[in-house]
Image (cartoon, rainbow, N blue to C red):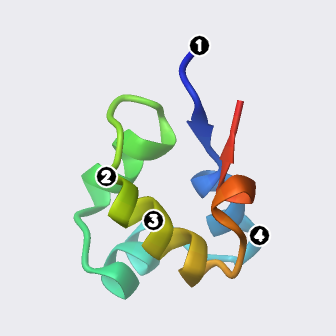
């Protein structure tokens, strides 16, 4: 079973658009869309950076 990131939920809870997040973390908007839609996986380093950015643990960032 593929794990799904809680990126979209965290981004929306913070009131951010994909464009705003893209600028904040210096990643292309399309890449964020692919992560949110489960079309591609992110590197562990990126997942750690995003969990820190959203102030959640890595375990909280990743869910089934």
Q: Compute the Cα span from label 3 to label 2.
A: 19 Å
* Sequence-first disc among 4 and 2: 4
**Residue at coordinates 48% horizontally, 68% vertically from top-left?**
48
Quadrant containing the N terminus is top right
User: Which residue is under mark 4?
Assistant: 13
Q: Is residue 3 shown left or right of residue 46?
A: right
Q: Is residue 48 shown left or right of residue 32?
A: right
Q: Compute the Cα span from label 4 to label 2.
A: 23 Å
* Sequence-first disc among 4 and 3: 4
User: Which residue is under mark 1?
Assistant: 1
Quadrant location of residue 52?
bottom right
Which dot marks residue 43? 2
User: Which residue is under mark 3?
Assistant: 18
* Sequence-first disc among 1 and 4: 1
Quadrant location of residue 2?
top right
Q: Is residue 63 shown left or right of residue 44?
A: right
Q: Circle 4: is it few (<14), some (14-19), or many (20+) Cα within 10 Å? A: few
**Residue at coordinates 48% horizontally, 34% vertically from top-left?**
37
Mark 1 or 4, which is nearer the eye? Answer: 1
Mark 3 or 2, which is nearer the eye? Answer: 2
Quadrant location of residue 15?
bottom right
Q: Is residue 5 shown left or right of residue 63?
A: left
Mark 4 or 2, which is nearer the eye? Answer: 2
The image shows residue 32 at horizontal and vertical percentages of 37, 55
Element under disc 2? loop
The correct choice, above or below, for 59 with respect to 4 in the image is below
Quadrant containing the C terminus is top right
Mark 1 or 3, which is nearer the eye? Answer: 1
**Residue at coordinates 35% horizontally, 38% vertically from top-left?**
41
How many discs appear? 4
* Sequence-first disc among 1 and 3: 1
């Amino acid at each position: 079973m593929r794990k799904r990131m809680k990126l979209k939920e965290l981004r929306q809870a913070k009131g951010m658009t994909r464009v705003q997040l893209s600028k904040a973390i210096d990643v292309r908007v399309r890449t964020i869309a692919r992560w949110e839609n489960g079309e591609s996986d992110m590197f562990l380093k990126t997942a750690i950076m995003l969990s820190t950015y959203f102030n959640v643990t890595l375990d909280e960032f990743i869910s089934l």
